[in-house]
Image (cartoon, rainbow, N blue to C red):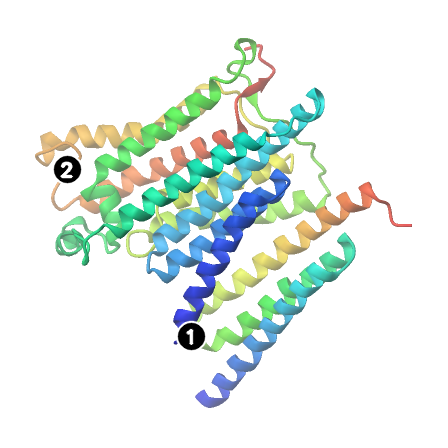
Amino acid sequence: MTPASLLDLGIGAVALALAAFAGAARSSFAAIVGFVALGLLLALAWLRLGAPDVALTEVAIGGGLTGLLLIGAERRLRARAMAEGAERVSARVRVAAAVLSAGVAAGLAAAVLSLPIPAPTLGPAALRELPRTGLDNPVTAALIAFRAVDTLAEKVVLLLALVGVWSLAPDREWGGRPGQRYPLDADGVLAFLVRLLVPVGVVFGGYILWVSAEAPGGAFQGGAILATMWLAARMAGLTDAPRLCASRVRWALAAGPLVFFAAGLAGPLVAGGFLAWPVGFEKPVIVTIEIPLMLSIAAVLGLLLAGPAQRDGAR
Amino acid sequence: MSGLLDLWTVVAVSGGAFFFLAGTVGLLRFPDVLTRLHALTKADNLGLGLVVLGLLPRAEGLQGAVKLLSVWLLVMLSGATVSQLIARVAGRESPPA
């Protein structure tokens, strides 16, 4: 047995153990910690499978942002449970959840195992056409050129998710500021860290987008980093969430999908099809779309984490 | 020359792995928050530092070396800050006698 396969076996075994821990943990906070650690481990597994783009997304979204969302939900639920008297989940609900999860897992496993070997692939065709996109990273080419329509729809789904979160606000708070206002300790360690970290993070987010033309990275990963920087600045009290009715907020959210749509609609005129990029200008068009797209993704993810409006509802 | 560099990588990365192991054992075995934090800093600063120093000779050019060093610096920066924050909460909940 080679060291590499030992490593793979180890990652798989620890991932299973962490999943079992997250499922069986007594406190929901411990379960969330297990879930976040599982996300980091899955990223290692994706790296071992040769999919660094997926690994980056798994770290940023699966581990980081989802973990933060869960921690926020747990704190809210715990506060309510304390107010209403602790309410325990009944054994029947737990068994039903376990059966449902096991069913989904079994279905996924059956689907994966039923694939023919070798699996059908468009990989060679995508690689053959790669030079025509002006990009060197086939994953980015698939996202923004070959299957741009999927990416566009995904951004619209993100916006819909945010609308869903916003709808949880009561009428009088609608359009107000989301989340709590964190106190600023101007000489504190957190403010110090954030002042140092945010410029680095902003440059890094831009770098992750820029490098995605030839290496793993992309608008989603870059946007997730920018959103995290905004969250850090908010938690240190250095900035506050804007009013959700502010027009700059709405434009920041819509700019990415709008530019994407506009470029797609220009396609039939200049390149012979919806979401077709003009020959010879593929790279500039893609960069022009991806920059506002990253900013909009950052805004959506940041505001998803901030939650529904709950303060100063007066508009 | 390359043999010496290989030896350096093996020694430093093994040292780093040792500190990670020691830090983990400390995290699991130590009795309270402050001593556990103390154990964690060994993994963060010394463990990761030795791994990075060990990998430096294998970095792809100056850019790769700078990337490795930045990872270490950023982890140290965030690790130190988070330790401070956790210790402050712990101190507030159970003031040291």
Q: Which residue is rendered at x = 62% and y = 40% of the image?
A: A29
Residue extending farthest left: A272
- Report crowding for label 2: few under 14, some 14 to 19, many 20 or more residues within 10 A (C-alpha): many
Whole-percent x, y for residue A169 in the image: 53, 16
User: Could you say which is closer to the camera, residue A163 or residue B4?
Assistant: A163
Q: Is B3 rendered above or below residue A137?
A: below
Residue A25, compared with residue A153, is above or below; it is below
Q: How many marks?
A: 2
Q: What x and y, as percent, mark residue B77?
A: 63, 55
- Disc 2: which residue: A276
- In the displayed orientation, state which residue is furthest to the right: B97
* Left or right of residue B35: residue A201: left
Task: Give amino acid for label 1.
Answer: Pro
Please tell me whether mark 1 or mark 2 is closer to you in this view.
1
A42 relative position to A83: left or right? left
* Residue B1 shows in this picture: no
